[in-house]
Image (cartoon, rainbow, N blue to C red):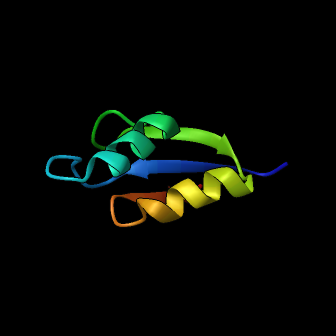
Amino acid sequence: MATIKIKQIRSRINAPKDQKRTLDALGLRKMNQVVEHNSTPAILGMVNKVQHMVTIVEE
């Protein structure tokens, strides 16, 4: 299965609680942190929910 790298580009300050929880579930806790996940529908749905705070890193 393909993997994707997700990078947090915006701060979680003043974000709603459910979006903070989604960032925690993705493993993003700090700005500019990059995590790698399998490209499953669940992960892609979480990325879609916080798409204004994260970006997909191309290698």
- What's the residue at 25%, 55% (across, down)? 10
**Looking at the picture, does residue 34 appear above or below residue 47?**
above
- Horizontal and vertical percent position of residue 57: 51, 56
- What's the residue at 41%, 59% (across, down)? 50
Looking at the rendered structure, the number of numbered marks drawn on it comes to 0
- What's the residue at 67%, 52% (across, down)? 42
**Looking at the picture, does residue 51 appear above or below residue 27?**
below
- Horizontal and vertical percent position of residue 18: 36, 48
- Horizontal and vertical percent position of residue 7: 43, 49
Extreme residue toward the left, this view? 14
Residue 31 relative to residue 33: left or right: left
- What's the residue at 34%, 66% (across, down)? 52
**Which residue is at the front of the view, 48 or 2?**
48
- Horizontal and vertical percent position of residue 25: 49, 36
Residue 36 relative to residue 28: left or right: right
Quadrant housing the C terminus: bottom right
Extreme residue toward the right, this view? 1
**Looking at the picture, does residue 1 appear above or below residue 41?**
above
